[in-house]
Structure formats: structure tokens, C-alpha cells
Image (spheres, grey):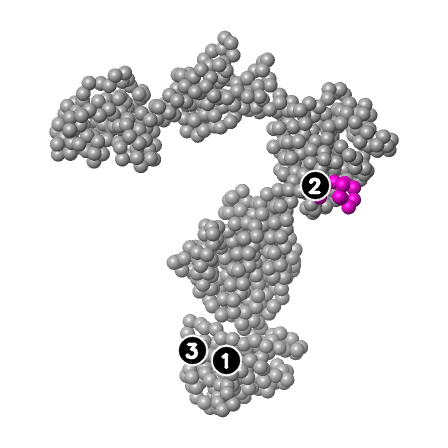
Amino acid sequence: MASDRIPQSPSDLDAVVAALLDEYGRVVWWSRGATELLGWSGEDMAGTPARRLLRAPAPGARPRSEGTGRSRTLRLLHRSGRVIDADVRLVEADTETGVLALALPPGGPGSWDQARDLARALLAQGAFGVARLDMDLRLVHANAAFEAQRPTGADDDWFLDLPDARGAATVRSTVQHVAETGTFATGVAYGIGPGREEAALLLSCFRIEDPLGEPVGVAVVATLGDEPRGPRLRDAYRQALEIGDSLDVVKVAQDLAEVLVPALGDLAHVDFPDDVLQGREPPHGYIGQLASAPRRAAVKSADGPWPAALVQVGERVPTVPERPGTDAKIIGDVLVADAERAREILGHDSGLIAKFMPEGMHDSLGCPLYRAGRFYGWASVYRVRNAAPFDDADVKLMRDLCARTALAMDNAFRYTREHQTAVVLQRSLLPPAATESAAAETAGVYLPAGGSVSVGGDWYDAFPMSSLRIALVVGDVVGHGLEAAATMARLRTAVQTLADLDLPPDELLTHLDDLVQRMRVEADDPEALGGSCLFAVYDPVSRTCQMASAGHPPPAVVLPDGGVAFAPVVPGPLLGVGDNPFEVCSVELPPGSILALYSDGLVQHGHDPEAGMAELETNLAELCTGDRSLDRIGTGLIGRHPSTEHPEDDITLLLARTRAIADDAMATWEYPADPAAVHEARAHVNAQLEAWGLDDLLFTTELIVSELVTNAIRYAGGPVSLRLIRDRVLVCEVSDPSNTQPRLRRALITDEGGRGLFMIAQLTTRWGCRYGARGKTIWTEQPIASGPGG
């Protein structure tokens, strides 16, 4: 078609008539819409010259637009004999011969005639000016209200070169942008010019397109109003938009003072109560109810330093006794006072006058910073060189500036309160920064997002698993704020619970993915739930680390020789996507290797994660030297991040330096499915414990081994393997080829069995069962008072 844009209204599409004509003007294809409009079927029209449908042209018909297509209002013959008016466009085909005819009836819902009626009504009204420009920005038509705004003797394009309120653009550039892009502009203010500085032309513009999507011009709607109180006050309103950009309340006070001078006077100050200065949201009340006097937070002088006689920055503001006639102003309105009125308010107290009234003051404005019943501060501005009193426009500006400042501070405190609450919640849910275990020493670093970004849902975790193994986890929840922190807490708890089942990493992530899917079903905003997670398990016995990723970046591995590489883990889909398996990656780590798990906030430098990962690799190679502690390495990595001051996203880092169990601290035996092997197992265990000097554990360990090996031979068959591992605890493992889940139960007095696992639970600090590729392993832990080598 001639346009890349297709009308989106279903009524328009249903009403379009389409017919394909050959080089002789005969119909070779006839649309269903054409049949519904004119009554002729495709069979009726096949090979029929299209001109037979034409009747006399409609009165006043003329081309609607220029360009590749030709559009006219034509009268077409219906099969019943009646005549139907329609707008018809002929579009040439890509081939040398053939024409596509498109038509839309002017009558009915969504028709072009109704659009014309609306246009006529807009042009006829006189409340605001309406003009139509063509695509070359030439004035085609303007109503009387628009023409009334034209300065005497001005040309048709008089308004196109008017500057906007900021002097950054003209009407011409704005309208040209609307014509080219199809976007719209609303309520843009333009100064009218010399002699009319206090007036402004407020314009809204939008592009005009014909029903088939061809741009044909731009509509301009204009109203004449008062410019926001002249250039001086207009600039003040523009600068006021920057108040509140910072969460630093002192900076907010400085911003307000910078606007007040020179917009309203020669001197200005802003005072804040202690609660505000100390980052606490003030209680409800007004200035007279403060426990202590406010402090001066910011001052501004148009000429020279701030007068030494007045209250200086950081000093407490003297208390002014409340007086009838000023209380209402102090509570919530602008207080206007000339020199005599100011002395009266101050009770003609010479000390207060010296502190509050600059020498030579003619007039003053004071206004409280109130929002939602809370007193955030007080602002005052004075005129010393300018003897003109403040007028209503000045009072309104003062009120508007203070109201905006109070709103900005209220929003900042709300953000700060939520941010601090989320940070406290998140930090309380994270594990200790440093942990020590037989498998590894770990150190974690969490840096919440700064600036205007609320805390996110990043977390890390390191916790022990069975047989001296350690789990390492890093996750990142979608979104920010309290909801993200709460979701993070649920996922972290779920990971620990699933890890207690000794599931392999891929199965654990699959169950975690199922949980997120259920959470999304229950959530008000399902798209706001999701995230990534990396789960790794390091075994100090086999010295291997198994890991799986749900959309999380791979960890970095620093070997003892200083080599750095990223683990070849293949990230699966993000949590909550579902129906996709996760892959397990196994990496052998020599003792002393450093594993670095992190969230994407650490490597997204300028939204280029590849560059960030390359930089992380370089930094790890430089920092992981000698015996440098993990805390120093983590601090160094965070310190080298380009946006440590105000990171765009949470930064989470978990470092783990691996350890290994010595060969002489392990013993392994294998037995056939023979009841006589139980005696042999007890003998092996006793001999090994005596060799290790663990005589105090002989009795309990013999009972544990006897019970577990007996059950394995009786219920699972062989072969049965037994392993002892000595570290801070004594680990006893019995493995068999069965997948039957052992179950702890309370035996009755009359039962002959069923007390084995109950007895084991009483003799050990921890016990459990995990499954492997073939069979299961029941493990127990007993404390060793003197630790390894005892």
C-alpha cells in the first residue's frame, strides 16, 4: 500500500473497499468488503470495466491529497440502483500494469464525513485558535480566534519563529518534529515578543493523516494567556523544577535559596528542624510545637557575603514569640511584612531584630514548608536594594516554591524510609559476611543501589550441607523496594529448604522455578516476579564444585597459580519461565582456589556485561595474589566499580576460598550383602578411630555403623560402602544401591524393631539421607571436641 501505517480501527478496516484492476481498467479481483458495500459479487465483477460503476461526480469533489496515490470523492453504483458516495484512492502496483483501488464510504460509523464535521466545528468555535499547516509548514487554514492572536502587520508564518519559555526551541522546530515523527506536543509556552513579555502563546500540535495513513499536515491549537509572571518569574518556575532532585536535605535548601535570589529578593535563607537535618521525618505539628529551635541550613546573598549580624549557617534560629495575627501565617501561609510590620512581629526586640532583619530591609516574605501536616522548615526572602513591595505574583511564587520544596522533601523522606526499611530487611536476611567451614572460607559483600533507585532483591548465601560440603548461592530478584526484598526472602528460604533435601543443583533450580511460577499466579502483577539464581555445591572430599544457573552470569574461578577463568556453566532460563531444564556443570578446584559469585550489578558497566566481565577477570588477577584476605579482595573489587558512590543496581559479591580434606583424614571400606560384614565393619571403625585418637567416640560410632550397615544389607542388598571423614566433626556415611527413603518413627513398647534411626538421632548432632545417580547415602555427624588432629 502507499502508506506504511494501517488504520487500526476495526470499523475502518471493515468498511474499506478494495479492487484490483488490470491495465484496461477491468476488475480482476474484488474484495469481500466491496461486495458488502456495493452488492456486486466477485463473480459479477470479474472482467467488468470499473468505469461502469461510476456515476456523475459528487458536487464540489476535488483531489484530497497529492503524492503517489490519487484520492477523490466519487459516486458509485450499488447493485440495487442507488448511488453511494465514497472516497476512492488509486494506488499503482509494483508491476508496469495494474492498479489497486481502495475506497471508504463517507457515511456510517467512523466515516470521513463525520471527521469533516468535527473539523468544521473546531474551526468555527472561538474559544481557542485552530490552524492547519501542510507538510511544508505553510498555513492552509486558520479560524478567527487564531487570526486574532496575530500581531498587526505580521505574515502568515508569524508564529513559527517564536521561542519557547526556555529559549531552547521555536514553534517551527516543534511543528517540524511533529510533522516528521507523528508525535504530538501539548501545552508548550512560547513568548509572543516585544511589548508583550507578560503574555504567552500556549500551543498543542498533532499530525493530520488521511484515513489510509498518509500524513497531510499538522494541526495547531493555540490559546493566549499570561506568561508565568514575566521573564524573571518564568525563569524561577523553570529553576524550581530542579528543587528536590537530591536526597540531601541541605542541597534541597541550597537549591531553594538559589531560586529565591534573585527571583524575589536580595537575601534569602532556609531553616530546618533537627529531625530533617538528621535524616528523620519530622512529626506532625507546626513550628511552635518544635522541641528545639530550627537551624539555618542555607543562605543566599545577591551581592557579597551573608551579613554577619544575621543568623549564620549551622546556628540555631532564635525563637520568636507567637503573636495574634501571625500564627495563621506561620502555620500555613505566606507572611508578608515590611520593615515596620517585621519589627512589630519581633516585638521590637533589638536582639531579634538584629538577628532577623538585614540592615536596610524594605520588605520580606516568609513561608513555612508544610506537607501532610508535617513542618519541614521555613524559608524567607528580603528586599534590601529594591524598595518595591512584594505583589500578589511574588506571593504566589513564594507559595508555589515552598509547596514544591515541601512536596519534594516529603517524597524524599518517603523514599528514604522505604529504602532504609528495605536495606535493613535485606541485610537482616543475608548470612554473616564471613564464614569458616571445612570446605571453604567465604566473604560476602552487598552494596544497595543508590540515587533514585530503591534497593533490589539481590542476595547471597553460604551454608553447610551434608558430609562437610558447602552450598554457595547468588540470586537477583526482578524489581526494587520492599516487595523485591520480601520475594528474595522467600526464595532464599526455599533454597535452604530444598538444599536440605540434598537435591542436585539442576533439580533444586527446577523446584525453585516451580515456586516462582506459583508466586506469579498469586501475585497482582505477575510480570514483576522473577529473577535469576546460581546454585553451587563444593565437596572438599572430591574437590569438585557442581553448579547450575537460572539466567545468572557464570562465576569466576581463580586458581592457586593465579589463572582466572569463568566456569563453563550454561545459564538456563530465568526463574518463572518454566518448561526448560537446567544443566549441571562440574569443575575441579584445587585447594586454595577462589570462587567469585556475583550479581549482574557488578559487571554491567554502561550496560555492557561483556566489558564488565573482562574487567572483573583483570581485577581478580591483580587482587587475588599472595595470602590476601577475602575481605580485602572483595573491598578492592567493589572499590574499582565505576559507580560505587551511587550504583544503578544492587551489587552482590560472594567469594569462597576452597579447602580440601586430607587423604589421611578419610577411610573407606566396601562390604558384600552378607550379615557377617557387620562385624567386620565394626572392627574397621574401631581400629580407625583408635588410630585417630578418637577413643571417646568408639561406643557411639560402633552403634551407628552397626545399625546402618545392618539395615543396608537387610533391606537394600550389596554392595555396601562405609566411609569415615574426620574434621571438626566425625562424618559417617553408609551407601547402598537402594532408593528407599529411611523413615524415623516412634516404636511401640511391643515392637521388636523400628528404634534404629531413633537411636541414631539421639547419638548424633545431624543425620540425613541423600540420593545419587545410583542408590542413596545415609550420613551422620558427631562433634569432635578437640577438632582435627585431636
Name the secondary structure under disc 3: loop
For marks 3 and 1, give the one nearer the viewer. Answer: 1
Instruction: Name the chief secondary structure element in magenta.
Output: loop
Classify residue 717 as left or right of residue 70. Answer: right
- For marks 2 and 3, the one nearer the N-term is 2
**Looking at numbered disc 3 in the image, what kind of residue is underneath it?**
Thr
Residue at figure coordinates x 47%, y 68% from the top left = 503
- Crowding near pointer 1: few (<14 within 10 Å), some, many (20+)? some
The residue beneath circle 3 is: 740
Foreground: 451 or 150?
150
Foreground: 385 or 127?
127
Farthest residue to the top: give it.
153
Tally of numbered tags: 3
The residue beneath circle 1 is: 744
Residue at figure coordinates x 23%, y 27% from the top left = 101
**Looking at numbered disc 2 in the image, what kind of residue is underneath it?**
Phe
Residue at figure coordinates x 32%, y 28% from the top left = 211
- Crowding near pointer 3: few (<14 within 10 Å), some, many (20+)? few
Name the secondary structure under disc 2: strand
Viewer can see residue 752: yes
Classify residue 68 as left or right of residue 706. Answer: left
Name the secondary structure under disc 1: loop
For marks 2 and 1, give the one nearer the viewer. Answer: 2
- For marks 2 and 1, the one nearer the N-term is 2
> Quarter of the image holding residue 391?
top right
- Expressed as whole percent of the image width and height from the top left, the position of residue 419 reads 61, 49
The residue beneath circle 2 is: 375
Magenta residues (range): 285-294
Foreground: 576 or 655?
576
> Quarter of the image holding residue 269?
top right
